[in-house]
């Protein structure tokens, strides 16, 4: 990110920004991205009392294009050239299913609980790479994956309390997101990030329109502002997350992703009087630690393959 050539304030900010270490820039980007995701999740929860989550999914994707549009205007449409349209369609279809399940979970389940269970997505991705791609894991990674799912059991406490629908939807979303990550990995071998993002945004809007029309009602008043906030904050958060991982080592920035649970707990308490249980905090810590270790080991093995 470079703000040179802009007004004096922007230039001063750029000078300060470039003076930071790569690790510091990556951490700041990650922290801000967690805030963006938390704002989006809270706005979805708030607006779900008025609009169906499937309709919110559509507007999140539609207004998310506002952020991406300047890149299109600057780069033109040449980046949309591809020979892998079926895979782009598959990825977008999976993404819509995952987002729909997640937004429906946000509508009916405490924010902290949803964010905690969402950390299982990397664990599902790891298992799916073994089942679908034939990758081999050593015992330490299998132990971390098992430990992570134990964390989910700590939150859900099956047999002690009834597992609510929102928790099931969050786990379903995490599982489908695991499939989505495999599709993204496949696309990343031949497609640029701009091409992948361009098709994602285009197809997400198209695929989410049908379900939205089925439950359609016109937003009223301030609902439009909240929908725009959801679209912009969600897309900006994704961009900042990608930039963070690009700027600094994964092992440096990824621990700060846990702030999603912290922000969700604060916002859930202030706006919806939700108080996370001790089991949610313990389970979230276990799941996140396991997911972080799996990501760390994958990063290590990737570097060894490059060497």
Image: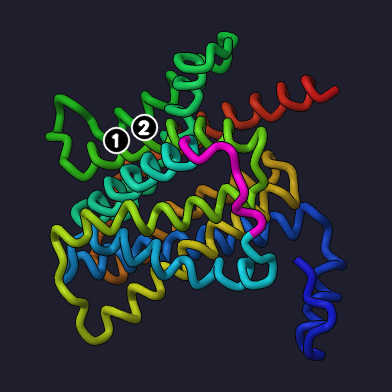
Residue placed at 24% from the left, 70% from the top? 47
Disc 2 vs disc 1: Cβ atoms closer than 8 Å?
yes
Between the residue at mark 2 and the residue at mark 1, the CA separation in whole angstroms equals 5 Å
- Above-or-below relation of 92 to 28: above
Q: Which image quadrant: the C terminus?
A: top right
User: Within 10 angstroms of label 2, few (less than 14), some, or many (20 or more) residues?
Assistant: many
Residue placed at 78% from the left, 79% from the top? 13
| Residue 175 numbered tag | 2
Q: Which residues are magenta?
A: 78-86
Residue placed at 70% from the left, 44% from the top? 252
Pick whichever, 68 or 117, lies toward us: 68
Q: Is residue 25 left or right of residue 136?
A: right
Whether residue 80 appears in magenta in the rendering, the answer is yes
Is residue 1 among what the camera can see? yes
Whether residue 251 appears in magenta in the rendering, the answer is no
User: Residue lying furthest bottom in this view?
Assistant: 8
Which of the 4 quarters of the picture holds residue 33? bottom right
Question: In x, y percent, where is residue 30?
Answer: 61, 56
User: What residue would you read off at disc 1?
Assistant: 172
Judging from the image, what secondary structure is the residue with disc 1 in?
helix
Question: In x, y percent, where is residue 29?
Answer: 65, 60
Pick whichever, 92 or 8, lies toward us: 92
Residue placed at 61% from the left, 73% from the top? 70
Pick whichever, 149 or 93, lies toward us: 93
């Amino acid at each position: 990110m470079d703000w040179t050539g802009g007004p004096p304030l922007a230039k001063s900010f750029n000078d300060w920004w470039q003076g930071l270490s790569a690790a510091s820039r990556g951490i700041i980007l990650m922290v801000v991205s967690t805030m963006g995701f938390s704002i989006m999740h809270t706005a979805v929860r708030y607006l779900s009392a008025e609009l169906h989550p499937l309709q919110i999914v559509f507007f999140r994707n539609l207004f998310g294009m506002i952020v991406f549009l300047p890149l299109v205007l600057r780069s033109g449409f040449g980046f949309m050239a591809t020979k892998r349209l079926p895979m782009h369609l598959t990825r977008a279809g999976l993404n819509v299913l995952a987002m729909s399940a997640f937004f429906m979970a946000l509508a009916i389940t405490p924010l902290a609980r949803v964010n905690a269970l969402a950390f299982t997505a990397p664990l599902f991705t790891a298992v799916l790479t073994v089942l679908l791609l034939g990758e081999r894991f050593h015992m330490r990674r299998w132990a971390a994956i098992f430990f992570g799912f134990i964390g989910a059991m700590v939150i859900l406490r099956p047999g002690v309390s009834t597992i609510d629908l929102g928790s099931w939807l969050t786990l379903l979303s995490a599982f489908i997101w695991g499939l989505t990550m495999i599709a993204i990995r496949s696309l990343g071998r031949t497609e640029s990030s701009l091409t992948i993002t361009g098709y994602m945004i285009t197809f997400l809007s198209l695929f989410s329109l049908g379900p939205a029309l089925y439950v359609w009602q016109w937003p009223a008043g301030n609902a439009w502002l909240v929908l725009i906030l959801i679209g912009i904050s969600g897309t900006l958060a994704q961009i900042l997350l990608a930039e963070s991982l690009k700027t600094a080592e994964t092992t440096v920035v990824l621990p700060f992703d846990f702030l999603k649970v912290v922000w969700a707990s604060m916002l859930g308490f202030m706006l919806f009087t939700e108080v996370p249980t001790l089991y949610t905090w313990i389970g979230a810590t276990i799941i996140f630690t396991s997911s972080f270790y799996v990501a760390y080991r994958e990063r290590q093995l990737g570097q060894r393959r490059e060497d």
